[in-house]
Amino acid sequence: MTVRILVDGDACPVKDEIYRVAYRTEVPVTIVANSHFRIPAHPLIDRIVVSDGFDAADDWIAEHSDAASIVVTADILLADRCLKAGATVLSPTGKPFTNASIGGAIATRAIMADLRAGGDAIGGPAPFSKTDRSRFLSALDQAIVRSKRR
């Protein structure tokens, strides 16, 4: 199986970094979103535009994920679906989602949703930083090396 990167393209802050790693490692990338967007004109980079239906991009990514896939998403529920398909999953901050960590992430997500629904004023995620970008590049490189060894 050929290693490939699938990207939840809506609001992904590390697309440029993904492209650079793809060129260097010769790993194909598919960016999936529900609206048209620009991608580099390069044979390794592909774009899939899905309908604007609820979770259409997530559904496409989950259906095309397998053990050869490295999925980049901040969506915890999509991460869970991709892990169940055997994919390696990274957040844009470089934090890996694993079978051991996904349950806790889903539980935390549910608790935060309940707090918001109850009217509690809670802060959102920290602003994306240079450290996050660097951590992501390192994690993506490591994921590609591990995937190619399989």
Image (spheres, helix red, strand yellow):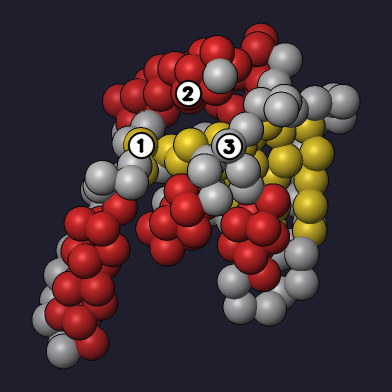
Task: Note whether residue 137 is visible.
Answer: no
On the image, the x and y values in percent for residue 120 come to 12, 81
Residue at the location (87% across, 25% down)? 43
Left or right: 116 as drawn, with respect to 41: left
* Amino acid type of the residue tagged 3 in the rendering: Ala
Left or right: 33 as drawn, with respect to 139: right
Between disc 1 and disc 2, whose residue precedes?
A: 1
Residue behind mark 3 = 67
Q: Name the residue nearer the viewer: 125 or 47.
A: 47
- The reply to whether the C-beta atoms of the residues labelled 1 and 2 are less than 8 Å apart is yes
- The reply to whether the C-beta atoms of the residues labelled 2 and 3 are less than 8 Å apart is no
Of badges 3 and 1, nearer the viewer stands 3
Picture layout, residue 49 above or below residue 139: below
Of badges 2 and 3, nearer the viewer stands 3
* Amino acid type of the residue tagged 1 in the rendering: Pro
Q: Secondary structure at mark 3?
A: loop
Residue behind mark 1 = 96
Task: Note whether residue 143 is visible.
Answer: yes
Report crowding for label 2: few under 14, some 14 to 19, many 20 or more residues within 10 A (C-alpha). some
On the image, the x and y values in percent for residue 71 come to 55, 41
Residue behind mark 2 = 143
Picture layout, residue 129 above or below residue 6: above
On the image, the x and y values in percent for residue 115 come to 15, 80
Residue at the location (66% across, 26% down)? 3
Report crowding for label 1: few under 14, some 14 to 19, many 20 or more residues within 10 A (C-alpha). some
* Amino acid type of the residue tagged 2 in the rendering: Ala
Q: Quadrant of the N terminus?
A: top right
Left or right: 66 as drawn, with respect to 46: left
Report crowding for label 3: few under 14, some 14 to 19, many 20 or more residues within 10 A (C-alpha). some
Residue at the location (58% across, 37% down)? 67
